[in-house]
Image: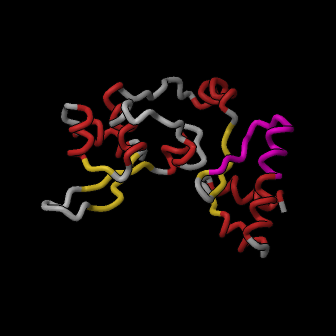
Amino acid sequence: MMAIIEAILFISGEPVSIKDISKLLDIDIKQAEELMADMSRSFTEQNRGLLVIKVEDAYQLVTRPEYADYIKKFTGIDREQSLSKACLETLTIIAYKQPVTKADIEQLRGVKCDYSITVLLEKNLIQEVGRLDAPGRPKLYGTTDTFLKSFGLSCIQDLPPLDEEEIA
């Protein structure tokens, strides 16, 4: 069964939900979760070039972070795409306060955040998650699965705790 899932995760390139895995293998979700935990542990223990990571209730095959330099060298992609301090501050507010409006972000940061929101949307780190039931129906923003993968998180609850004073 692990070989089947490995092949599915490899061709998918995107996270595959535990529901889809259990359906595909005709097993219950608890068995599928145990299988995925065993598979993840096996990849880690064997020190393979790939890892199985959990993103929310889905799993994905990814390359090991310690091989990033070799992958960049092979693919010719040699520049890091880092976020500016303003984008990181905006992303932090969204991650911890989601769902949150642009006005709320700007109030916390004390400056406009149009550019930061545009960059974060383009990088698929945030998304519109709804509209506030208030005059003007402002957009509400939240993080994406890409955010979780980028920061090595399984779910948003894995974010380190902050003092309320840090992001009031």
Is 90 situated above or below 121? above
Q: What is the total number of numbered labels drawn onto the structure image?
A: 0
- Residue 113 percent coordinates (x, y): 23, 37
* Residue occupying the point 58% across, 43% down: 153
The picture places residue 145, in percent across and down from the top left corner, at 51, 50
**Quarter of the figure with the N terminus:** bottom right
Q: Is residue 153 magenta?
A: no
The residue stretch that appears in magenta: 38-54
Q: Quadrant of residue 71?
A: top right
Q: Quadrant of the C terminus?
A: top left
List the single residue furthest toward the left: 135
In the displayed structure image, the side of residue 7 where residue 42 appears, left or right: right
Position of 114 relative to 166 (above/below): below
Q: Nearer the viewer, residue 148 or 5?
A: 148
> Residue at left 53%, top 28%?
77
Pick the residue in front: 109 or 38: 109
In this orientation, which residue lies closer to the viewer: 31 or 123?
A: 31
Q: Position of residue 37 (x, y in %)?
A: 78, 52
Q: Residue at x 62, y 59 (%)?
A: 57
Between 7 and 153, the one lying in front of the other is: 153
Quarter-wise, where is residue 135 in the image? bottom left
- In percent of width and height, residue 104 lies at 24, 44
For the view shown, which residue lies furthest in the front direction?
164
